[in-house]
C-alpha cells in the first residue's frame, strides 16, 4: 500500500508544473504606483487594467478616438474634463506567468546520465504564458500626478479612465468612436 501511495505522489509531482511567478489577475482596474506593479514603469500613480486584445490595439484605439495621426499617441494624449485640459500617457505591459515543467527536466536528466545525449527537451523545461496590461498615467499643467491619492483631480479623472477602458474593450471598429465624440 505504501508503494502505491509513493508511486502516486511521485507521478503527481512529476506531471505537475510548478509556478515560479503568477501574473496578477485584475477584475476591473487597479490604481497603484507604476513601479510597484512592474519594474520599468514610472513612479507615478497609474490606472491599470488587463488587456485581452492584441498588441497595439489600445494604441490604434487612442490614435483613432483622439484623431492624433500617429503623433504623440502614447506620450501626451490631450483630453478635457470640466473645462480643464489633461494629458495621459499609456504603457502596454506584459507580465508572464512562469512555470517549471518537471517531466521534460526529468527525462533530460535521465537521458544525460545514461547516454551522452544533449538535452533535447530544453525548450519545454519552463513555459511562459503572457498576460498584457494597459497602464495609464494622467497629468496636467498644475499636477504631475493626477491619480495620486492626494490629488484634487483624482475624483474627476478616475471615472473618465473607467469610461475610456469600457469603451475600448467594447469597441471592435475604432472608427465608431470618432462619431461618438
Image (cartoon, helix red, strand yellow):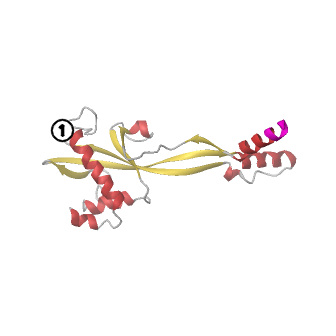
Query: In the drawing, does residue 129 fall left or right of residue 148?
Result: right
63 relative to 16 in the view: left or right: left
Query: Residue 66 at what x, y percent from top left?
Result: 25, 59
Magenta residues? 1-5
The answer to whether 150 is drawn above or below residue 27 in the figure is above
Residue at screen point 34% across, 41% down: 46
Of 168 and 42, nearer the camera is 168
| Looking at the image, residue 45 lies above or below residue 70 | above
Camera-nearest residue between 45 and 30: 30
Q: Residue at x 29, y 55 (%)?
A: 72
Q: Name the residue tied to disc 1.
A: 142
Circle 1 Cα neighbour tier, 10 Å, few/some/many (<14 / 14–19 / ≥20)? few
State whether residue 70 appears in this view: no
**Residue at position x 28%, y 33% from top?**
149
Q: Is residue 91 magenta?
A: no
Residue at the limit of the structure toward the top, as seen here: 150
Question: Above or below — where is 160 with respect to 170?
Answer: above
Please state the horizontal and vertical placement of residue 89, each as a whole percent of the image: 31, 48
Task: Identify the main secondary structure in magenta.
Answer: helix
Residue 12 in sight from this viewpoint:
yes
In what quadrant of the picture does the C terminus appear?
A: bottom left
Task: Determine whether, in the image, residue 31 is placed left or right of residue 121.
Answer: left
Element type at mark 1: loop
Question: Residue 32 appears at what percent x and percent y?
Answer: 36, 37
In the picture, which quadrant includes the N terminus? top right
Determine which quarter of the picture holds residue 20: top right
The structure residue drawn at horizontal position 22% and vertical position 37%, both measured from the top left corner, is 143
Amino acid at each position: 500500500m505504501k508503494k502505491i501511495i509513493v508511486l502516486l505522489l511521485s507521478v503527481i509531482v512529476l506531471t505537475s508544473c510548478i509556478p515560479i511567478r503568477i501574473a496578477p489577475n485584475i477584475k476591473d482596474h487597479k490604481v497603484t504606483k507604476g513601479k510597484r506593479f512592474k519594474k520599468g514603469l514610472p513612479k507615478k500613480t497609474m490606472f491599470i487594467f488587463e488587456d485581452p486584445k492584441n498588441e497595439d490595439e489600445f494604441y490604434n484605439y487612442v490614435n483613432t478616438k483622439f484623431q492624433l495621426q500617429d503623433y504623440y499617441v502614447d506620450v501626451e494624449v490631450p483630453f478635457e474634463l470640466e473645462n480643464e485640459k489633461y494629458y495621459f500617457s499609456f504603457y502596454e505591459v506584459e507580465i508572464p506567468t512562469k512555470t517549471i515543467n518537471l517531466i521534460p527536466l526529468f527525462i533530460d536528466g535521465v537521458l544525460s546520465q545514461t547516454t551522452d545525449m544533449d538535452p533535447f527537451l530544453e525548450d519545454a523545461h519552463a513555459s511562459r504564458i503572457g498576460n498584457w496590461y494597459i497602464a495609464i498615467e494622467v497629468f496636467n499643467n498644475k499636477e504631475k500626478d493626477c491619480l495620486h491619492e492626494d490629488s484634487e483631480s483624482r475624483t474627476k479623472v478616475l471615472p473618465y479612465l473607467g469610461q475610456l477602458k469600457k469603451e475600448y474593450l467594447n469597441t471592435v471598429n475604432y472608427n465608431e468612436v470618432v462619431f461618438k465624440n
